[in-house]
Amino acid sequence: MRMKLFSRFSRKRSPNFSPSTFQKDNTNDSTSENSGHMISSWMETPVSKRPLRKKHLSRSYDENLMDDYLDKQLGNSPRKRFRTKKELEKETEKEAMIALSLGFPIDALLEEEIKAKVVSELDGKEQNDYIVVRNHILSRWRANVHAWLSKGEIKETVSNEFNHLLHSAYDFLLFNGYINFGVSPTFKPQMPEESTEGSVIIIGAGLAGLAAARQLLSFGFKVIVLEGRNRPGGRVYTQKMGQGHNGNYAAVDLGGSVITGIHANPLGVLARQLSIPLHKVRDKCPLYDPEGKPVGKETDSKVEFIFNRLLDKVTEFRQIMGESCGDISLGSVLEKLTKLYAVATSVEEKQLLDWHFANLEYANAGPLSDLSAAYWDQDDPYEMGGDHCFLAGGNWRLIEALCEGVPIFYEKIVKTIRYGENGVEVITSDQTFQGDIVLCTVPLGVLKKKMISFVPELPERKLEAIERLGFGLLNKVAMVFPYVFWGEDVDTFGCLNRNSENRGEFFLFYSYHTVSGGSVLVALVAGEAAKSFESTHPSTLLHRVLNVLKGIYGPKGIEVPNPIQSICTKWGNDPLSCGSYSHVRVHSSGSDYDILAENVANRLFFAGEATNRQHPATMHGAYLSGLREASCIYRVRQTINNNSNDDNNNNINNNNKQNNPKKSIRRIIGVSDTLVNLFKNPDFSFGNFLFVFDPSNEDDQSTGLMMVAIDNDDDDDDKVKVKVNNGQSQRAVKLYTMVTRVQARDLVAVVGGGERGLSYMSENLGLKLMGMDCFALVANSLISNIATRRSRVRNRVVFGNRVSYT
C-alpha cells in the first residue's frame, strides 16, 4: 500500500496473531456453497504478501548511511582498469544490486532503453556489456550525488573497448534524469551559458514543473514558468505558523509532507544534496476508541489481521472475476466480504475496522465506494523501498532550492492554451506568451473542471481518461500548541469514530514536533468526511478536534491547551487544485495515467502526479514526471532538428525547393512585454538611464534592471548619442543590462548621464548593454522576480523621479 502525495501512515500486519478463529461462517449465508474459490478458508496462504510490522528503530534517519554503504562496497577511489576476475565479478554484482534498487532490471533493459536503441542488437553480448557499464555509471553517481559525474571520470574506470557503450549509457542516463539531477551547487557550472534549443512555457511551479524547468535549462532550452499562485510549490505548501515566545515560527506542511520510501527516491537525493536532516517516521501508532480509551493490543492485532485478509480476498475475487471487476467498487466488495465471513461483529471491532478503511481512503484520497476493485492498488509493485521520512524545516526547502535560477512569473492564471505547427500560445488574464512547446503540469482536478481551454480541443481518448480517473480529497487541521502534551515518543496516533459515515474525521494525528521547530500536531480528515469538512466553519472544526484530544488526554490527567494558531485546509475549494491527489476510480485503470501523459502533436506536453502510472499521488511521482517530460521534449526537438538537417541536405542534393519544418521561435514572447511594463514606472532615472529594482530587497548588492535609451539622430553625422532630456525620441534604441544598487548610485553621482555615462558604465563598471530579445532571455528569471515583487506591493508612492514602497 502506497504513501500518497499528502502523506500516509500504514499500519502493517501483526506477526503474532493466529488466524485459527477466523473460519468461514456459513450459518446465515445461503449462497456460500456456490461461492467457490472466493470464500476459501482464512487459513490459506495470502495471495499478496504484506510486510510485517517493523521493529522499533532509532528516531533519527541517517541518509548518509547509503553513502557509507557504497563506500564499503565500491571503495573510496574509482575502480581501476586492472583487477582480478573475482574482484571484478564481486564489484559488478554489487553495482547490479544498486541499479536494481533504483528500478533497473539486473539482466535486462528498461523499455525506455529499448526505445532509445542503446544497443544495436538485443539479448546478446553487447547488451550484457551495456548493462554492466550502465550499472557502473549509476553506482558511481549515487555514491556522490553532490558532484557532477562526467564522461571523462567514467572513462578512467572503463576499458576503451567499451567506449561506445559508455557514451550510449551515459547519454541515456543523463538525458532521462537518472544521473546529474537535482540542486547541488556544483551543477551550476554545467549549465549552458546560451540557449541552443527551442523555447518551452511551463504551466505550474509545483514539483513537476520545477523539475522539468531545471532539466530543460540544463539541456539548453529557453524556459519560463507561469504560476497561478503567488508562491511556488503547488500542493506542496509549507506554512509558517504560531510564533512562539522565542520569536521563532513553526514550519508546517499543509499539503505533501512525507518522503515515502527513501531508497531510490529522487527527493531523498535532493535532501542529501542540500544536507537537510531527515526524521524517520516511527512505527509506533497507538489507537484510541471514541471514548478516549486505548484499544487493547489483542483486539488491535485481531482486526488488523482481518483487514489485511479482506484485502487478500479482494485480490482473489478479481482474479476470478477478470475484466468485469473493473466495474465494481472496492467498497462494495469489502462490504460483502465482511458480511460473508461474519468478521468484526462487535461494536469495537467494527469501529476499528472502519479506522483501517479510513486509512485506506486516506491512501487513495477518496471513499472506498469510488475506488476500482480491480486496479486501486495497480502501482503497489513500484513502491519506493526504505523508511518514510519527514524533512526537517518542511518541504519548502526543496521547493526553494528547485526555484533557484528558474524564471517564474507568479499570479499568471492560464485561461487558454493554443497549439499547432507554428508553435504554442498561452493566454493568461493579463498577458499572452508564445513559444515552441508548452508543458502543462496543472492538477487533474483543474483539468476535470475544464478551467483551461485547449485550442484545438484535446484528443477524445485523453478527455475520456481525464473523466475516468478519480481525484479526491484529504484535508488537515494543523495546530501549533504552547508545548508537546501528547508525548515525545510518538509521531502518529489514531482515533476511532462511532459511525461509519464519519470514520475519516480526525482518524489520524501526525506530530511534527521533531522537525517543524514547534509543538505541531496535524489531524487528518479522509473519505466522505473530507467532503463535508470543506463546507464547515473552521471554528467548528477546531472545536471538534480539541474535544477529540481532550477525550484522549483528559482521563490521563493531561490538560489540552488552546492552540497558538490553527489552519484548516480546503483543497477541494482551492480553484488552482480542485482536490488533493488522484486515484483509480471505478471504470478506470492504470493505463489512464499513461494516456494523460501522452503529448499532443509534439507541442503540448503533460506532467504531474496524475501522469505517473508507477508513482501516482506521491511527491516523488510528480518530480519524476517532470524529469520524464523534460526528456521527452528533448527527444522531440532532437528529432525535429535531425529531420530539418536531412531536409536541408536533400534540398541541396536535389537542387529543388521543399517545405522545411517550422524553425524554433528562439525566444519566449511575453517576457519582453513584462520588461516594457516594468520601465513604464521606473524606481528612479536620470537622463535616459532608467532603473528598476526588487522592492523587497534594499541591499546595496541586490541586482536590478537598467535601460538606456539611445537616440539615433541622422542629422548629426549618423553619430549615435544619448538623449539626455526626459523626452525619448521615437527613434530611440533601448538597450538593457543588469546593475546593482551601488552601481546605479555611482552612475548618478559620478557621471550624471550623457555619453560619459556610457563610457563609465563600460570601462569602470564592466557593464554590457543588450537588445530587448537577448536581455529578456538572459535576465528572464530576474525580470519575473522583480515583476512578482512589485505586484505584491500594495502602496507605491512617487516623489519626483523616485519611487518608494510602503
Image (spheres, helix red, strand yellow):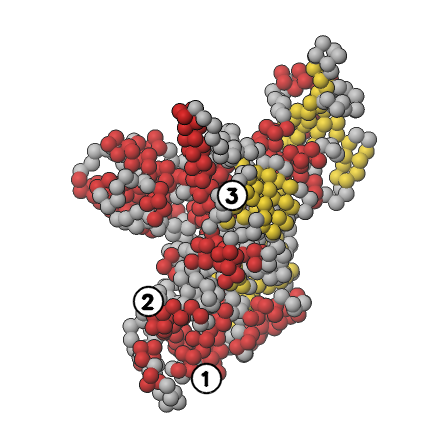
Identity, as a three-letter code, of the amino acid under mark 3 = Arg
Q: Measuring 70% from the left and 40% from the top, which residue is drawn there?
A: 790
Amino acid beneath label 1: Ser
Residue 566 drawn at (x, y percent): 63, 61
**Circle 1 Cα neighbour tier, 10 Å, few/some/many (<14 / 14–19 / ≥20):** few
**How far apart in space, not on screen, are marks 3 and 1 (Cα)?**
59 Å
Residue identifier under label 2: 49
Q: Amino acid at mark 2?
A: Lys
Which residue is rendered at x = 45% and y = 36% of the image?
A: 640
From the viewer's perspective, is residue 786 above or below residue 479?
above
Pointer 3: what residue?
Answer: 603
Q: Is residue 294 depicted above or below 27 in this figure?
A: above
Residue farthest toward the right in the current orientation of the protein: 800
Decide which of tag 1 and tag 2 comes sooner along the chain: 2
Q: Quadrant of the C terminus?
A: top right
Q: Secondary structure at mark 3?
A: loop
Q: If you read the primary sequence from the N terminus, does the residue marked by circle 3 or circle 1 appear first? A: 1
Q: Secondary structure at mark 1?
A: loop
The tag earlier along the polypeptide, 2 or 3, is: 2
Neighbor class of circle 3 (other Cα within 10 Å; few <14, some 14-19, many 20+) is: many
Choose between 41 and 248: the one closer to the eye. Answer: 41
Describe the element under mark 2 as helix, strand or loop: loop
Q: Position of residue 190 (x, y in %)?
A: 45, 32
In the picture, measured across the screen, residue 581 lies left or right of residue 302, that is right
Residue positioned 39% across, 55% down in the render:
384
| Residue 191 % position (x, y) | 48, 33
- Residue 621 appears in view: yes
Label 3 vs label 1, nearer the camera:
3
- Which label is found at residue 346? 1
Q: Position of residue 448 (x, y in %)?
A: 56, 59
